[in-house]
Image: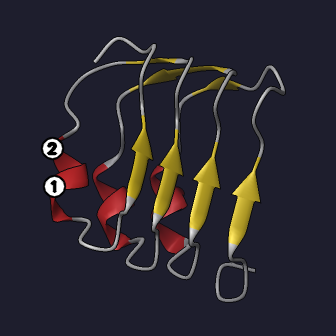
Amino acid sequence: LGGTLKVLALGDNQIGGSLPESIGNLSNLELLSLNDNAMTGSLPATLANMTSLSHLVLSSNSFRGSVNVLESMKNLTSVLIHSNEF
């Protein structure tokens, strides 16, 4: 699944918990949208393995910590992370 999945859009679904380290296995993902959920924790360093990701939408959750991992993601063209605890 990780090799073919391009879009994962799960916004506004009351999803809780943190992003698992295994999210980085979705190396061909171009859009990750998890906005308006109840997600917590910090962004895993494995996000950097998502080399095809161009759009990241994590707004309106309770993520916290550093967003430094995003600096190494050169294909990102759109990042929406407002309304978190960064």
Relative image position of residue 45 (x, y in whole percent): 28, 52
Q: Residues within 10 Å of mark 2 (few under 14, many from 20)?
A: few
Circle 1 residue: 71
Circle 2 residue: 68
Q: Quadrant of residue 3?
A: bottom right
Instruction: Indicate the amino acid at tag 2.
Output: Asn
Instruction: Indicate the amino acid at tag 1.
Output: Glu
Q: Quadrant of the C terminus?
A: top left
Q: Quadrant of residue 74?
A: bottom left
On screen, residue 16 versus residue 43, left or right, reads: right
Q: Quadrant of the N terminus?
A: bottom right
How far, Cα to Cα, is label 2 from label 1? Answer: 6 Å
From this view, report whether residue 44 is shown above or below residue 40: below
Relative image position of residue 57 (x, y in whole percent): 54, 42
**Helix, strand or loop at disc 1?**
helix
On screen, residue 25 versus residue 14, left or right, reads: left
- The residue at 55%/18% (across/down) is 61
Q: Residues within 10 Å of mark 1 (few under 14, many from 20)?
A: few
